[in-house]
Image (tube, rainbow, N blue to C red):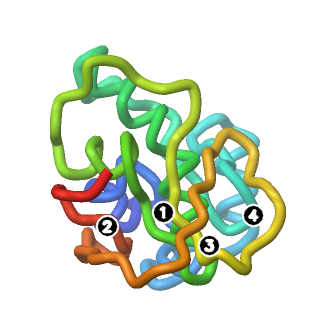
Amino acid sequence: MRPLPPIAEQQCGVFATFQAYRVGWTPSTLSRAVRAGDLVRLRRGAHQIADLSHLDEYEQQRWRHAGPGVGAALTTPGARVSHSTAAVLYGLPLLFLPSRACVVVPSWLTGEVPAVHLHRCTGDRSQNQRGTLEATTVAQP
């Protein structure tokens, strides 16, 4: 398998297709890695590494929880990770992991994202940059 995009470590093992292309991946190498079980396709344009054995069990669960939210934020215009997903990216402890990752999207965005709880936001919300991701600030949910 080709080297993963370095940014994946900052994004809970998730990377966007455009990030993979920058380090030499091609569409066929991505497809082969998914078929071989090295990557999990979260959604069109976003993948997560399948083998998280380098992490302890607690952190593996956190990364698997956050993965769909990170993938959605990387591939949805105007989206940013929030709530439990942002807490995982910031390394903050959680009492429990909700059933779905959380992402804030613009109010005009319609539809749903599988495995992700969408929060529609009408106002300008403060945000931080986490790698190439936008995330709500720690002071916000």
| Three-letter code, disc 1 | Phe
What residue appears at the point 73 percent right and 75 percent down from the top-left corner? 109
> Label 2, label 3: how many angstroms apart (C-alpha)?
15 Å
Residues at discs 1 and 3 in contact (Cβ within 8 Å)? no
CA gap, disc 1 and disc 3: 10 Å
Q: Which residue is mark 2?
A: 7
Indicate whether 77 appears above or below 8: below
Where, by quadrant of the figure, is residue 77 drawn? bottom right
Residue 19 in the image, given as x and y percentages of width and height: 48, 77
In-front residue for pair 27/16: 16
Pointer 1 with pointer 2, Cβ within 8 A: yes
The residue positioned 26% from the left and 29% from the top of the image is 54
Q: Indicate the secondary structure of the residue bearing disc 1.
A: strand
Q: Label 2 sits on what residue type? A: Ile
Give the mark nearer the N terminus: 4 vs 3.
4
Q: What residue is at 83 percent from the left and 62 percent from the top?
A: 111
Lower position in the chain sequence, tag 2 or tag 3: 2
Q: Secondary structure at mark 3?
A: helix
Residue assigned mark 4? 44
Bin the neighbour count of mark 1 within 10 Å (Cα to Cα): few under 14, some 14-19, many 20 and up.
Answer: many
- Callout in the foreground (4, 3): 3
Q: Residues within 10 Å of mark 2 (few under 14, many from 20)?
A: some
Dot placed on the residue nearer the N-terminal end, 1 or 3: 1
Q: Which mark is residue 15?
A: 1
Circles 4, 3 touching at the beta carbon (< 8 Å): yes
Q: Rounded to the nearest whole Å, what is the CA distance between mark 4 and mark 1?
A: 11 Å
Determine whether, in the image, residue 121 is placed left or right of residue 10. Answer: right
Check disc 4 and give the amino acid type: Arg
Of 19 and 121, the residue lying toward us: 121
Answer yes or no: do the residues labelled 4 and 1 have beta carbons within 8 Å?
no
* Labelled disc at residue 75: 3
Mark 4: which secondary structure? loop
